[in-house]
Image (cartoon, rainbow, N blue to C red):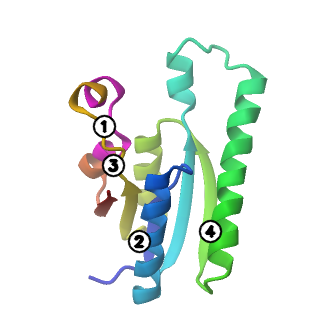
Amino acid sequence: MNFKRILVAFDGSEQSKKALEVALDLSKKYDAELSIVEVIPTELLAGMGFTPIPDSVINQIFEKARKDMDYVKNLLSKEGIKFRTDILQGDPGTEIVNYSNKNNIDLIVTGSRGLSGVKKLFLGSVSSKIVSEAKVAVLVVK
């Protein structure tokens, strides 16, 4: 396979940092462009009773996402590779898959949360959703 565009699902967690490291190695090997995407889970917040979602909550979440993207930019700018960062809103699994489809992504790299059976049943899994719905190869990093 030849990967020219690699998407990394990023949320600042240790798992997503590991996924970014793997994607960085792959981007160097294949001379691929990286797209690093963080999704603000606005649908999840609305489902938890935050309707409308208070501006203070939205501002805090977006500020965290901006800091995550600054971390990514600082890390990748030293590597001499092509990359872009985006912050999206909605259901993380759905938004990652939609972004992949719209941007001709060849590979999606995501971290694994390692949730237990009961937690996974109730919380769902972003990586599971991506694996089941993506039209391209998906690499889940543990």
N-terminal label among 3 and 1:
1
Q: Nearer the viewer, residue 112 or 55?
A: 112
Q: Are marks 4 and 3 in contact (CB under 8 Å)?
A: no
Is the N terminus in the top left, top right, bottom left or bottom right quadrant?
bottom left
Judge left or right: residue 132 versus residue 46: left
Position of residue 36 relative to residue 80, above or below, is above
Q: Amino acid at mark 2?
A: Val
Crowding around mark 4 (Cα neighbors within 10 Å: few <14, some 14 to 19, many 20+) is some
Label 4 and label 3: CA atoms lie apart by: 20 Å
Q: Position of residue 42 (x, y in %)?
A: 57, 30
What amino acid is at disc 3?
Ile
Rendered position, 6 above or below 42: below
Element class at badge 4:
strand
Range of magenta residues: 120-129
Of callouts 2 and 1, which one flags the residue occurring earlier in the amino acid sequence? 2
Q: Is residue 29 above or below residue 126?
A: below
Mark 2, secondary structure of its residue = helix
Q: Are marks 4 and 1 in contact (CB under 8 Å)?
A: no
Name the residue tied to disc 3. Answer: 130
10 Å neighbourhood of mark 3: few (<14), some, or many (≥20)? many
| Residue holding disc 1 | 115
The answer to whether residue 84 is magenta is no
**Is the Cβ of the residue at disc 3 closer than 8 Å to that at disc 2?**
no
